[in-house]
Amino acid sequence: QKEVEQNSGPLSVPEGAIASLNCTYSDRGSQSFFWYRQYSGKSPELIMFIYSNGDKEDGRFTAQLNKASQYVSLLIRDSQPSDSATYLCAVFMEYGNKLVFGAGTILRVKS
Amino acid sequence: NAGVTQTPKFQVLKTGQSMTLQCAQDMNHNSMYWYRQDPGMGLRLIYYSASEGTTDKGEVPNGYNVSRLNKREFSLRLESAAPSQTSVYFCASSEWTGGRSSSAFFGQGTRLTVV
């Protein structure tokens, strides 16, 4: 079992729709969760971080964390073509004190 | 404020050659990481250093060695490069305490080709 799992996609949504990206993780003791966006040929850039169960909103982005289910998600409202990128879920593992990434989900927003 | 500086940006090696990728951060972070990224595989952890003076293997350590030279610098060495090591390499740093971590800051990446 991989430590952090994501559906690789691609996920295609029409412009203006909600994109929902999901991630599961194996270390039940994990406390820090991150979503990064990566454009082709560029370094990952942070979109959201979340530490506590529930929802955290920042503009068009909402991160959701459910520690009991070991599940974290990212919602992107009013999706724009500029949101087309690879979205990487990262989890700071209590076991080993290391930051582990999922394989990433490719998002395509069609105008 | 440079953040994470990673060199070189591009490199072509012949099979069997060695090289060292350099990484330095100026944010006083305790953790530093080396990842490789291949198409469709996200960022895979090669080695990391959770604090100055420690290093640990990640998911794909074979063929690599690392040195945490001081708190700022963390280098990755390929002793005998193989075509399977053709990839994009990212260095990153973050600060963790009490089981929680800040977000990671990334270098610009090194595009390595082994022929």
Image (cartoon, grey):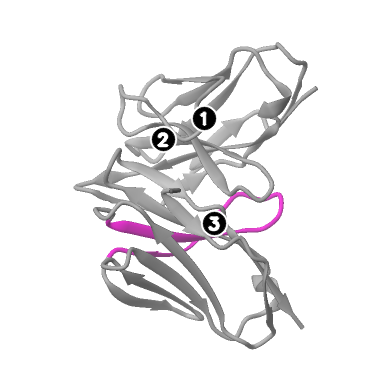
Q: Residue at x 71, y 54 (%)?
A: A40
Label 2: few (<14), some or many (≥20) within 10 Å? many
- Judged left or right of residue B6, residue A5 is left
Residue B104 appears anywhere in the view: no
Q: Give percent across and percent down for residue B40.
A: 66, 51
* CA–CA distance in space, label 2 to label 3: 17 Å
Determine which of the numbered discs, if any, sits on residue A45 in the image: 3
Task: Give the magenta-colored segment's residue range.
Answer: A31-51
Residue B59 in the image, given as x and y percentages of width and height: 47, 35
* Residue ID for mark 2: B32
Q: Is residue B39 magenta?
A: no
Classify mark 1: helix, strand or loop: strand
Relative to A71, residue A58 above or below? below
Q: State the residue at coordinates (47%, 72%).
A: A74
Q: Position of residue A55 (x, y in %)?
A: 34, 78
Residue that mark 1 sits on: B23
* Chain of the residue under label 2: B
Tell me where residue B6 appears, x and y as whole percent: 57, 33
For residue B87, which quarter of the picture?
A: top right
Question: Mark 1 against mark 2, which lies toward the viewer?
Answer: 2
Q: Magenta residues: mostly which secondary structure?
A: strand
Measured Cα–Cα span from mark 3 to mark 1: 18 Å
